[in-house]
Amino acid sequence: MQDKYRILALDIDGTLARNDRSISEYTQQTLIQAQKQGIRIVIASGRPAFGISPIADQLRLADYGGYVLAYNGGEIWDWQTKSRIYEKPLPDESIPVIYEACRRAGVDVMTYCGSEIITETKNNHYILLSSKRNRMQLTVVPSFLQGIRYPIFKCMIVGEPERLQEFEPRLNAALEGRAVAYRSEPFYLEVVPAGIDKAACLQVILSHLGLDRSSLIACGDGYNDISMIRYAGLGVAMENANDQVKQSADYITLSNEADGVAHVVNTFLLS
């Protein structure tokens, strides 16, 4: 094993996971082998920690001192001790602003509370998809503002791509810099605290470990991965990533369907 890189940050959807949301046995065993040789793994995802935990356990992060970066960096968990070492929730006063803007625009909003997804909407296809993807219970409440429990780390607004594209700048204007809305997928508009991104929170982990960015490899495929790809000592885009993500990367690996993460590990981390 080489000594230059000591930490590997991995997005989940479209990166670590295949299109059916599973992780191949080959990729799983390759990542466990890397950890046995001293590489620390950070799962860096927009998902809540509850939705990441099955993958963290599958990869045995608790055995090897790994970390979970949830909500694109709103929370950081030391998975070995199950302790939260960093958090930055949405400002409480921004939640009614988000809700009222969604109500006026006729789009649906949801958020995550523990193991639950909280929403007023029962049968929205995109909300049901998030519930299934994260293995979280869907709780439908008569009043979103009364049904949620603070702190809130992320709100997710769902709808048809054309409507969300038009709504995004209006919502950002209403938030007045207290939080930021961006689309992680055409039908998902995420709202997170201002200043939260994967790169900023990876810097927290590196400082915690006494490492610098030159020791980091970061792999991703989406727009919310660009900051960590640019920040890392080696930024990697998946073959299935869009052109903007690829242009931000130092290296393009195989696709998520072809064990692209394992290819990176074998090329740069294992002898």
Image (cartoon, helix red, strand yellow):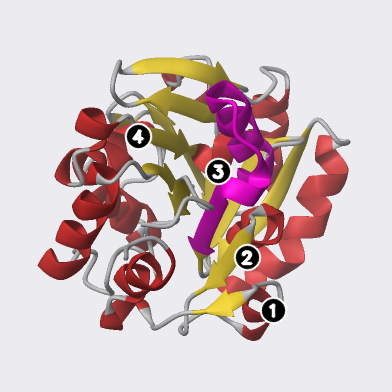
Looking at the image, residue 97 sits to the left or right of residue 238; the answer is right
At x 59%, y 39%, the residue is: 202
The image quarter containing residue 260 is: bottom left
For the residues labelled 3 and 2, say whether their Cβ atoms are less than 8 Å apart: no
Q: Which of marks 4 and 3 is in front?
A: 4
Residue 244 bears which disc, if any?
1
Q: Give how far apart the Cα atoms at labels 3 and 1 are.
A: 19 Å
Q: Nearer the viewer, residue 160 or 251?
A: 251
| Total residue callouts | 4
Q: Give how far apart the Cα atoms at labels 2 and 4 are.
A: 24 Å
Residue named by callout 3: 72
Report the amino acid beneath label 4: Gly
Estimate how packed mark 1 is, as few (under 14), some (14 to 19) or many (20 or more) residues with alpha carbons within 10 Å. Answer: few
Report the amino acid beneath label 3: Asn
Residue named by callout 4: 66
Residue 117 visible somewhere in the drawing: no
The earlier-in-sequence mark between 3 and 1 is 3
Q: Give how far apart the Cα atoms at labels 4 and 1 are.
A: 29 Å
